[in-house]
Amino acid sequence: MLCSRQELGLGAENAGIWELSKTWELGSDVLAAINAAPSMTVSITPNRPDLLSHLGVAREVAAATGVRRRSSNWRLVETGPGAATLARVVVEDPAGCKRYVARVIRNVKVGPSPDWLKQRLEAVGQRSINNVVDATNYVLHELGQPLHAFDMGRIAAETGLPTIRVRRANPGETLRTLDGEERKLDADDLIIADADRPVALAGVMGGAESEVTSSTKTVLLESAYFDPSTVRRTARRHALHTESSHRFERTADWGCVHKALDRCAQIIAEVAKGEVAKGVLDVSQKIEQPAEISLRLDRVARILGVSFPAETVVQLLDPLEIRCCARNEGALRFQPPTFRPDLTREIDLIEEIARRYGHDAIPDRLPDASGDYRYQPPADDTVERAREALLASGVSEAVTWGFGSPDAYLNGVGTQEVPLRLKNPLGEEMSALRTSLLPGLLAVLRHNQRHGAKSLKLFEVGTTFHARKSKADEDERDRALPLEVLRVAVVMWGERHEGRWYQGNEHIDFSDLSGVVDNLGAKLQVVIAKQPKKAANLHPFATAELSCGGEVLGIAGQLHPEKSDSLELTGPVYVAELSFNALKLLGTRPITYQPLPKHPGTRRDLAVVVGDSVPAEDIRCYLAENAGGGIGKVIERVWLFDVYRGEGIEKSKVSLAFAIEYRHPDRTLTDAEVNQAFEKVIANLKKEFALEVRG
């Protein structure tokens, strides 16, 4: 079969059929002929940046197999004038760049890389560019240290020398990066600049104005240690993810900065015939050595279930270059290497011991169930009790993003508030911290409606974030943080009894939402009152303010039809949102014992016609307080059981039917007593609310 190198997976060239060398012997191994070795693909976790290089993987393989790792035998030759007489480096932001070293390589001949270099880069999925750039990419994969090569002839001079400055970007500065994009720089971006302009995004990508080309004669080679957080923010801000930023974000090995520079300079001198100037340009801050870690042998035995002698522990960790620096009775002290930023605690060393010893070699053992364990309920279980109440009401829990579109909160439901903006958002739709839980739940509802759902009842418990009003007595750190409020929100829509044909084709309405709120209050041992209230994007005649003891808890109501249309929602949607912070301030009602009634009760029904602007809850509360008519505390409960609009009722009025249940705790009430109290409350009710009693 006739194939190109690309079709065989042996290179990127696809211009035509691959012509084999006439010197190759028929029947021989083609992989040996093209110097291709078997490859190994590994998946690296974010906490192991040391494995993002062949050296790091070789170190692990050598430790696992017991094979001694070969040391490299290259040698750098320096000639000509000193680097300090050819260029200068100034680090203006030592927090963002703790070490910056550079070499000058003169008289380079930029061109295609030799086959061995091309093939090795292709084996790791790297496209060959030219011999100088390929050398930097080769060392990146070999040692894990990102480098960058500048055309020194295009670096603007200061005080007579081409000058590199490591600084933050100035307002209005732009940079055209190697991908051809013109990027507007942020004041938080760490950049590499010359005397006139930015020439690279530090640790992320170089600039097109200073890239190495076929006309380059002198190269300024950079190797540095950039702050991981700074690089991460810059890369996210500009939506760039490069081999360089991938390593700097995870913490590069500052101990390898100089070694990688020398190795790359040696390769450039070899493949581009360059002359490496004597010495390096080195601007370094004091970098602390990794802290020593104390390891208790009894702690190792307790965690792993296996006792190890001190010598065995040292032998297990030494191949990983974790050196023992002190031995005490029952404890050892180890010095982690600079390439292992994940080793900071005793438990990290125990994990390494288990990994080296072999998890399969640790014997199985049942856990020790002895001990006097007693369940301690949480001091504040308000949230869990709220979850129980909502789940018992048939509402399912959802979890949504803690951030969203600013417009969703500026034009929010119930409340409208300017949200706090993220400095490095994933996009405009995820650029603001949420001030309400409802936009997220409504987005979930829209998604389900589009996928054919007939009804949905959702709740979420989560934190909202608000701008903090500074107080003089607040801690300075707290003043800089947003105010966090724990909330619960409910969204209900659709058929009341989905799939139950025998219960009729009814739809969820405000009474269903009100019942869920009542159940929530009962579980939390508070009485949640509902008063008519107009709120943003809620129906003006189907919205209530939720309160308890004069403290406003939240809002409940029907989503305004116009808001439903703008969100592409169908049918009436009912929402509620309450603050747990306010609920916790109220405390709870004491639970009191009430014996079963010994005497029979009696019921009276009352139907009234009243203006539709009069809240039914006001009438219900009046009846609950006054229907006793002087007999005593005989009103067991009052509830609304029917609402009627239609024939026989004026358009601006509504018929409300209430049930009143009478019961005396110590004796049986007579009909005469109940009738007298009932007639009295009706007379007073007419005066209080200007209503009519239906026959």
Image: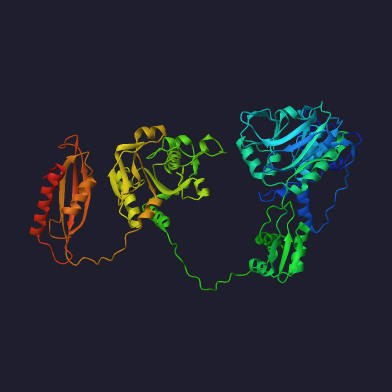
The residue shown at (55%, 36%) is 427
- The image quadrant where one finds the N terminus is top right
Q: Is residue 327 above or below residue 639?
A: below
Give residue 334's position: percent from left, percent from top.
73, 61
12 over 340 or under it: above or below: above
Q: How is the image coloured?
A: rainbow
Is residue 231 shown left or right of residue 491? right
Horizontal side of 113 relative to 313 (left or right) equals right
Residue occupying the far right of the picture: 23
Quarter where residue 449 is shown: top left
Whether residue 121 is visible, yes or no, is no
Q: Where is the C terminus found, in terms of image quarters? A: top left
Pick the front one: 625 or 6: 625
Q: In the current view of this chain or complex, which residue is farthest to the left?
A: 672
Rendered location of residue 508, percent (x, y): 33, 43
Find residue 270 and report its image quarter.
Answer: top right
Is residue 166 something that shows in the picture?
Answer: yes
In the depicted view, which residue is nearer to us: 538 or 205? 205
How many badges with numbers are in the image?
0
Residue at the (92%, 36%) spot, across then down: 23
Across and down, in percent, residue 229 comes to 64, 44
Compared with residue 550, is residue 175 higher up or lower down, i.e. above or below?
above
Question: Can you say whether 307 is above or below 621 in the image?
Answer: below
Residue at the spot 16% in from the left edge and 43% down from the top edge = 689
Locate residue 573: give its quadrant: top left
Name the spot of residue 237 as percent of width and height, x first. 60, 36
Q: Is residue 542 left or right of residue 405?
A: left
Q: Residue furthest top?
A: 215
Q: Nearer the viewer, residue 256 or 401?
A: 256
Observer-nearest residue: 57 or 334?
Answer: 334
